[in-house]
Image (cartoon, rainbow, N blue to C red):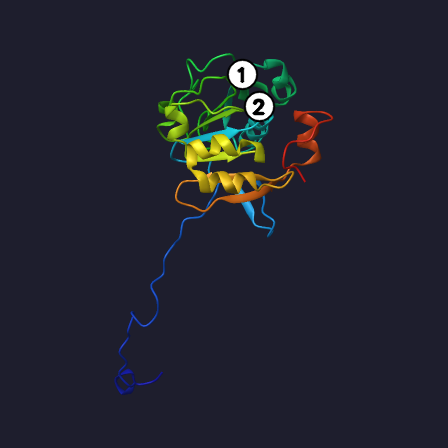
Amino acid sequence: MPDLGALPAARWNDDAGPAFGLLPAHAGVHLGTTAAGQPVSLPAPGPGGTRVAVLGESLFGRLFALRLLGVGARVTAATRVPDQWVSLGQAAGDRLVVTDGVGGWPTAPPAPPTVADGPQALMCDLRRAPPAGLAEGPWRTVLHVTRNAPRRSVFWSAAHVVLALDARFADPVARLLGEDAARRTAALAAGEIILFRRGAAAEVLNLDISPGETALLTPGRRLPGQR
């Protein structure tokens, strides 16, 4: 064993290298892929409430519901077309409730995945947007999908995420997010969709949808943006 007293003295400098840090990641439910091959996710479910505003067909609400069910959320569908939720309801069992209004939601206390009833999600395709306050609180996700964004809607003006599923929605995007966002939307190619989120650049992508999802949601139909 060496004589410790004879070893040369050394001075450690912990500041020699850059500090270690963690950067936030866009975790959530996978949505699709950009032209560069980058995956794009919607930030839900999460420990903070999320409002998602979608310009498009009600079919998107069923797709998002299916993926939320897959990560342990309990979903309520407030819909004008309950018959279109039948196949998904048969697969989801009591994890999916179909109703004609948003009253009484959430049906159980929101909680993290695997805890009690887990995260709570509301998918709404009614003409009137749900109250913005429904998304306040942890483990709550509220989505409103419509072809015509309601004017003077608190929900839409406070949305954390806005999606346009086709170039024809450039005009309502202009009213919601400004002319630059509208130009990006108008430039969408056939099959592309665009996602706007607070504090981040817009992302143009194609939806990634498995054959099983397509068969379950809409036999014989394809979603906008599907590869």
Residue 109 figure quarter: top left
What residue sits 56% from the left and 28% below the top?
56
What residue sits 44% from the left and 15% below the top?
102
In the rendered image, is residue 112 in sight?
no
Q: Compared to 190, does 14 lie above or below?
A: below
Q: Compared to 179, does 10 lie above or below?
A: below
State left or right for residue 159 relative to residue 95. Answer: left
The tag earlier along the polypeptide, 1 or 2, is: 2
What residue sits 64% from the left and 19% below the top?
90
**Nearest the eye: 184 or 63:** 184
**Nearest the eye: 74 or 33:** 33
Residue type, mark 2 in image? Ser
**Nearest the eye: 115 or 81:** 81
Q: In this view, which residue lies farthest toward the bottom? A: 6
Element marked by disc 2 = loop
Do residues under tags 1 and 2 come within 8 Å of each other at their CB atoms?
yes
In the rendered image, residue 33, in percent from the top left (x then y), is placed at: 59, 45
In the rendered image, residue 220, in percent from the top left (x then y), is placed at: 74, 26
Element marked by disc 1 = loop
Indicate the quadrant containing the N terminus: top left, top right, bottom left or bottom right: bottom left
Query: What whole-number distance in Å separates the C-alpha atoms at marks 1 and 2?
Result: 9 Å
Q: Residue under label 1, please give it.
A: 79
Residue type, mark 1 in image? Thr
Q: Residue under label 2, please give it.
A: 58
In the rendered image, residue 17, in percent from the top left (x then y), is placed at: 34, 70
